Image: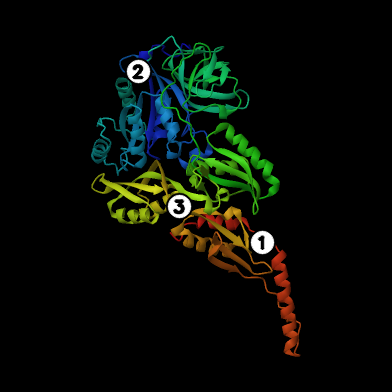
Amino acid sequence: MSNDFNDDLAHTRNFCIIAHIDHGKTTLSDRILELTRAIDPRQLKEQTLDAMDLERERGITIKSHPVSMQYTASDGQCYRLNLIDTPGHVDFAYEVSRAMGACEGAILVVDAAQGVEAQTVANAYLAIDANLEILPVLNKVDLPSANVPEVIRQIEDVLGIPVDPELKISAKTGEGVEAVLETLVKRFPAPKTDHPNGPLRALVFDSVFDVYRGVITYVRVVDGSIRAGDALRFMSTGQTTPVKEVGIFSPFQKPVEVLEPGQVGYIVGAIKDPAEIKIGDTLTSDRDGASVPLHGFKEIHPTVFCGIYPVSTDEYNKVRTGLEKLHLNDSAFTFHAESSVALGFGFRCGFLGLLHMEVVQERLRREFQLDIINTHPAVIYKVTLKDGSVMEIDNPVLLPDPTRIEMIEEPVIKARIITMNTCMGDIMRLVMERRGVVDCTETLDAQRVILTCILPLNEILIDFHDTLKSISRGYASMDYEPHGYQPSDIVRMDILLNGEPVDAFSCMVHRDRAVARGKQMCKALSETIPPHMFKIPVQACIGRTIIAREDIRPFRKDVTAKLYGGDVTRKQKLLKKQAEGKKRMKEFGSVNVPQSAFIAVLKGSSEEK
């Protein structure tokens, strides 16, 4: 082990920082890096642990970055601090829970001006479930709008966590950050191990792909130790690998001789495919390894699906290459090839949630300069057939014939919405318009309430969050978690262009919403598809029943312009000939659908709601 770190387990502290978006989590980690001198001041920059441009622009953490630091406390003792940075969004809740599984404590950062928000509550509950010691810290106390006594009352009343009034900081200026570290080393427990000499058990909490070294696995050692040359096995998959290198993060990868109980570090093995590493898995020795894995592992599956197609068919291979490269560093999303009559060849992709979908699409456009079209996002429906079998459908095209279907179930979520009292009625109305129910309401303070709602996941896919922010004038915040499935009257709606179905526009909708949704889609398409030489009917249908229709007017050439006088039958003859030509053209002509039509349908998908 490197001499830079104290090997004593009692002087090790593993912790994470959790917070609502924009409450100062990443800024606080910057100040801690400064204070512990873990990084050269010349290399320090804002949002040091956020490596991607997208993370910096949006102010969110997408990929976690652990870091080991050395801190000398006021009592003269030297402590090894392992900070495990976590993503903040609900889409990555499982990764957050596994990162918490590698910690003994969590710093809960709360904005002293904004108070407790939806993700503050959700992340605090995750930390409580993980039996972590929680240290609430009030940030941004230097703002004129900060209301420290009220925020302390919110934390104690809503979360039931006692607050130390002295832990008031400004992560931007560094005020009070040293007091947080002093309290941290006193209150957070040291890591414990029942079997320091083995058998090895280490928690896998993340992994990244390196072009030259393959998959680098991030681990927290619980029992035993890991050295270069050891042969290890992943307990959930049975995958084995020799260890080529072990190391710690300071914050850059730094090789060491051994990783011992309580330590957080990385291992470099012989695995080349990131999909073979499961987050939350237990790593043990290949020979004489542990028989009982660490608690909490589960397979993570995509919940939101959409099609991704190149605008130009020539870029199909380029899109495939981009998806394969992204998959190397983000094995949580899935993709497989599919084809569409309207869009040609593309890919069906699965994501952990809406933010995850946006991030992948944005990275394809930025990092690989791809011009792509994405179809309407969809969720997984459970379809019970009359013969008793159950299918999981994420693509409307795969839905069986309605005569074979006994029941369709859709996924639902449990959402916590924190909003101002004055907006409560509007938000309850929004929830009910989206086929949701308000389960209960709690008073947060004199101005805000917490609404707990049950909603179909399909109803929040497009613009629910935007609408929520709009009607609350930006003050409402929302966090959600899966809440099982419920039976629902779901039907498949198809869009016909010139009598031909366009599979890219097919979608699963609730029967009560089908007419309004069909009218909206037909109207959007009729306004964005350019006129052709013949009239194009745009129809929405359920089965063989047409529920909405719009027409795209044709170009009209004035064939009578060359006539000067004469009998009226001359005009009628020319017009009749033109009509026959358009009729023949309609039979054989094809309709070109521009990219703007897909965007118009996607963006306007809830204007009728």
Instruction: Name the mark on residue 570.
Output: none
Mark 3 lies on a secondary structure that is loop
Q: Which of label 2 and label 3 is nearer to you?
A: 3
Question: Label 2, label 3: how many angstroms apart (C-alpha)?
Answer: 45 Å
Question: Depth-wise, is mark 3 or mark 1 nearer the camera?
Answer: 1
Please name the amino acid that badge 3 sits on.
Answer: Asp
Q: Quadrant of residue 141?
A: top left
From the image, tell me which residue sits under label 3: 463
Which label number is shown at residue 591? 1
In the structure shown, which secondary structural element does the residue marked by tag 2 occupy?
A: loop
Q: Quadrant of the C terminus?
A: bottom left
Q: Is residue 69 visible?
A: yes
Marks 3/1: CA–CA distance: 29 Å
Q: Mark 3: few, some, or many residues within 10 Å (few <14, many ≥20)?
A: some
Cβ–Cβ under 8 Å for marks 2 and 3: no
State if disc 1 and disc 2 touch (CB < 8 Å). Answer: no
